[in-house]
Image: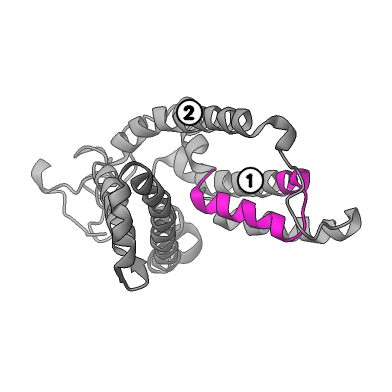
């Protein structure tokens, strides 16, 4: 984060995706410690619905689905997997809300709140660690989503199957194309700032669940409800043996949830 003296309206750094001047910079602020990106917002625009829609889109992910599916391999039954996921999600929600509350009340970002605990210079350490984790997860999520986009290409453009025979660095040419498409789409969304992200999430959050419900109804209608199995594991565990596995599965789910603290 760059430090910019408050010399004029054209010298201001954009405040975390908000319009110029969105950060409440004051003349007496030390320009080595504050800038438009770190100063409190003049006006917070996120309503209860915005936060709810954000949580709707944040609590699920392709990585989460992969993790949830893998829990069956541990010997858990469907209701046990559901319980483990709910417990893990609640853990994330609790600590995410605790971490976010000071920023929500004061309108300042996470690195500034960290100064209370780690000091002005030390706050950079957890902020960087948090950023590195976000970068890694961004790559993982984009890769998993690209695998799904590959299936769409193969379904509607059968000729794209030829690209599977060409690979680089362990990823097929089709995989690289899908990855690049999704990476670019996300980059353009993030580049336009938090206001654009807020408006996007307002409809994307509920839309994802609507599509999931419609697809679930379609798949059940095609497979027949009598063919739905709630015990997918080949090595089911008895109740007492499943308890430690469920206990381990809950925190395992928590860090894979995209609800980052």
* Mark 2: secondary structure: helix
Q: Is residue 102 magenta?
A: no
Q: Position of residue 23 (x, y in %)?
A: 27, 41
Looking at the rendered structure, which numbered label has been put on residue 1?
none
Near-viewer residue (148 or 36)? 148
| Residue indicated by mark 2 | 206
CA separation in Å, label 1 and label 2: 18 Å
Q: Quadrant of residue 42?
A: top left
Near-viewer residue (180 or 133)? 180
Looking at the rendered structure, which numbered label has been put on residue 89?
1
Q: For this view, does 154 lie left or right of residue 260?
A: left
Near-viewer residue (49 or 153)? 153
Image: 101 above or below 69: above
Q: In which quarter of the image is the N terminus?
A: bottom left
Q: Position of residue 197 (x, y in %)?
A: 33, 37
What residue range appears in magenta? Answer: 60-83
Q: Position of residue 125 (x, y in %)?
A: 42, 68
Q: For this view, does 87 lie left or right of residue 127?
A: right
Q: Earlier in the sequence, mark 1 or mark 2?
A: 1
């Amino acid at each position: 984060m760059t430090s910019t003296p408050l010399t004029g309206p054209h010298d201001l750094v954009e405040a975390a995706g908000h319009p110029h001047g969105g950060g409440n910079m004051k003349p007496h602020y030390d320009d080595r410690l504050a800038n438009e990106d770190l100063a409190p917002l003049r006006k917070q625009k996120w309503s209860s619905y915005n936060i709810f829609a954000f949580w709707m889109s944040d609590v699920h992910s392709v990585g989460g689905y992969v993790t949830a599916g893998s829990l069956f391999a541990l010997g858990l039954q469907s209701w046990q997997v559901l319980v483990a996921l709910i417990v893990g999600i609640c853990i994330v929600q609790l600590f995410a809300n605790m971490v976010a509350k000071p920023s929500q009340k004061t309108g300042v970002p996470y690195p500034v709140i960290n100064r209370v605990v780690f000091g002005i210079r030390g706050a950079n350490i957890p902020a960087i660690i948090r950023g590195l984790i976000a970068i890694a997860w961004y790559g993982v999520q984009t890769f998993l989503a690209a695998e799904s986009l590959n299936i769409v290409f193969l379904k509607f453009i059968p000729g794209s199957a030829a690209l599977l025979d060409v690979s680089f660095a362990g990823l097929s040419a089709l995989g690289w194309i899908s990855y690049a498409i999704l990476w670019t789409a996300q980059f353009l969304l993030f580049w336009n700032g938090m206001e654009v992200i807020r408006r996007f999430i307002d409809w994307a959050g509920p839309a994802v669940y609507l599509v999931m419900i419609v697809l679930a109804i379609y798949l059940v209608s095609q497979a027949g409800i009598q063919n739905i199995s709630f015990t997918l594991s080949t090595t089911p565990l008895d109740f007492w043996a499943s308890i430690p596995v469920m206990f381990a599965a809950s925190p395992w789910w928590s860090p894979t949830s995209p609800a980052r603290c």
